[in-house]
Image (tube, rainbow, N blue to C red):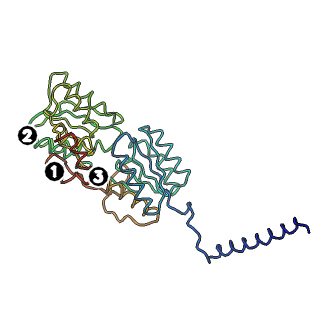
Amino acid sequence: MDYRKITVIICTILSAVLIAGCGSTASGNVESPIQEDDRIQIGLSIDSLLIERWSRERDLFVSKAQELGAEVNVQNANGIVEEQIKQIRYFIDKKMDVIVVIAIDDLALRDIIAEAKKEGIKVIAYDRPVRNANVDLYLSVDNEKVGELMAEYIRDYIGNEGTVIQVKGSPTDYNVQMVQNGFERILSTTKIKVDYAKFSEGWVAENGFIVTDEYLNTGKVPDAIMCGNDNLAANAIRALIEHRLGGKVCVVGQDADLEACQRIVEGMQYMTVYKPVEKLAIKAAERAVDMAAGVPLGLKDTFNDGTYDVPYEKLEPIAVTKSNMDEVITGKYHQKNEIYLNVQ
């Protein structure tokens, strides 16, 4: 008996059976699994994960997008605008359905976003606007309100007169200008004077120490310090401590970072602005999935990016102090044992 011939005959029969089975799946008798290529593809380009809030928001965004059936490719530009441009170009080459950008430079991304839109890719400017780019959605908090809340707290605390120094954020972040607009609007109704102000290129936190230390070395002490975010506030407070002024100057910031909340209950920082970033990140994921599916945004508000009126969705910020910490933050954004870690 020729066993090789028998083996060939058996293999031929088995192949025919397998082919028939595959034909059954293709004809629709058996449901085919969803291919990865069929899922909505979202690209997320982040400024830098050195800022505490971006890590939190990345995780919330990715989790919600995955829950809605989308896949997210996350890229961290480490504060380098050229790297962010490369990342967006990579997303274009990968034919993403939607690109979400936390912009490093509000003016530098116009051309690359134009390329994305030319390829039919939707673009969301997350938290920070991209000017003259005609993005499909700008989603953020009310940044002018952030500035107003800072100025209102300072005014209410030091009175209608006094001196303030400012450690602003990066000049390439247009949110910084919007915060400043709100801040100046309130201060213009008082006799409070901004005695010293500097930007912090790239949001480098150490500038909070440098600017504050420079001012204190003149022999003057401000009544208040307005900081562009809580990282800058932390370093401004470090300078105050070195000059034996810790807790004696009204320092305000924004983002409600955990360490800022700790400093507030300890009495070293007076106020921070909480921006509902959990809602913002989840809303961004929902909007991205809807946009990829062709669902209309249904928004009435617009934001002028310098050239175009783009759809605008904003959430309201909240001033956080020692008196309302538990109401706004505890158990919702940070846990009580973390906030009060250094407080009896």
Mark sitting on residue 198: none
Q: Residue at x 65, y 76 (%)?
A: 27
Query: Image quadrant for the C terminus?
Result: top left
- Crowd around label 3: few <14 · some 14–19 · many ≥20 (10 Å): many
Name the side, left or right, on which 84 lies relative to 21: left
Mark sitting on residue 324: 1
Looking at marks 2 and 3 on the same chain, the residue that comes earlier in the sequence is marked by: 3
Up/down of 6 relative to 113, above or below: below
For the residue marked with disc 3, what is the amino acid? Val
Q: Which residue is mark 3?
A: 141
> How many numbered discs, if any?
3
For the residue marked with disc 1, what is the amino acid? Asn
Contact, CB < 8 Å: mark 2 with mark 3? Answer: no
Give the spatial CA distance, label 1 vs label 3: 20 Å
Up/down of 127 relative to 229, above or below: below
Q: Position of residue 54 (x, y in %)?
A: 36, 46
Q: Which residue is mark 2?
A: 159
Name the side, left or right, on which 290 lies relative to 17: left
